Image (cartoon, grey):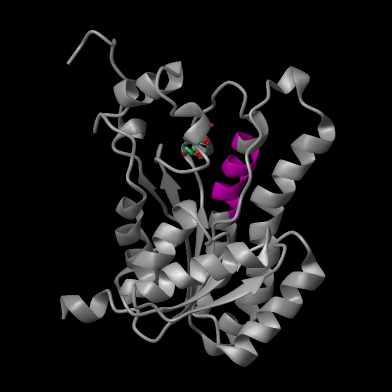
Amino acid sequence: MSASLFEVTGKVALVTGSTHGLGMSMAMGLGKAGATIVVNGNSSQDKIDNALEEYRAAGIKAVGYKFDVSDEDAVKEAVSNIETEVGPIDILINNAGIIKRTPLVDMEVADFKQVIDIDLVSPFLVSKHVVSGMIERKSGKIINICSMMSALGRNTVGAYAAAKGGLVMLTKNMATEWAKHNVQVNGIGPGYFATTQTAPIRVDGHPFNEFIVNRTPAAKWGDPDDLAGAAIFLSSKASDFVNGHILYVDGGILATIGKPSNED
Ligand code: GCO
């Protein structure tokens, strides 16, 4: 019984921004559990091709589609091509995102708007064009990748926090409107993970590196593979009555106010 609860074999999962980082880790987890992975990126075809080699070397059925998640015409065309060439999209993980670390007082409005566009408007845009098929089929799973910044502020990431905070409420509203069609919409809130996105603040000697290890009850940066279980849970039957929930995978950060650096 328990094995079929977490079954995703044969499901088609579109994971935006899955050529590297957390998107690739979650997609790898779903792929190893039997899902067909639709890999997305927008930087270069080479990056997609290299990622496909990694997925296929892991024994995962994977196909690649290069499109900009913020371009509605490109998204509509990509979703149509995927559903024609691969099959109906059963699982959508809105992972693609950017971050700009700049104090708000110094931030250009155009930069602020770009972060909102990619990190908040695009999950709406992609979901809108994927969910119509899910509603028709009366089945689907959508997972929005939130953040610690969905719940906490931090110097220099104000635009990102505004987007990721908004993504929590967008997740709850998608769940409100689509749950009656048997489409479950939830979020995953990663803590601080060792990825290319956090590489600049993880370098040895960077004050933030030590701060995070001290601020995280698990006393370490997360391993991206630690997200696979949450992705499988929210993509499978096991979460069929879970709607509008943000599952934080953060080593305990949101459970605590933290401790002085001289405390164990
Ligand atoms: C930062 C980090 C965070 C993490 C993640 C935390 O600059 O604070 O990059 O944004 O990437 O979002 O959940």
The answer to whether residue 46 is above or below residue 208 is: below
Q: Going by the image, does 65 lie left or right of 201?
A: right
Above/below status of 97 relative to 158: below
From what the image shows, is residue 190 above or below residue 153?
Answer: below
The structure residue drawn at horizontal position 70% and vertical position 77%, both measured from the top left corner, is: 78
Q: In which quarter of the image is residue 162?
A: top right
Residue 170 horizontal side relative to residue 113, left or right: left
Q: Where is residue 147 in the image (x, y as percent from the top left)?
A: 49, 42
44 vs 111: above or below:
below
Q: Does the magenta run of residues contain 221?
A: no
Q: Is the magenta stretch mostly helix, strand or loop?
A: helix
- Per the rendered image, the range of residues in magenta is 161-170
Count of marks overlaid on the render: 0
Name the residue rendered at 33%, 23% in the picture.
215
| Residue in the image at 68% along x and 25% along y | 102
- Nearer to the camera, 6 or 214: 214
Q: What is the quadrant of the N terminus in the image?
A: bottom left
Where on the picture, by quarter, is residue 161?
top right
Q: Is residue 166 left or right of residue 29?
A: right
Q: Is residue 220 left or right of residue 55?
A: left
The C terminus - image quarter: top left
Q: x, y (%) of residue 171?
A: 55, 56
- Decide if residue 16 is in sight here: yes
Q: Position of residue 205 (x, y in %)?
A: 41, 17
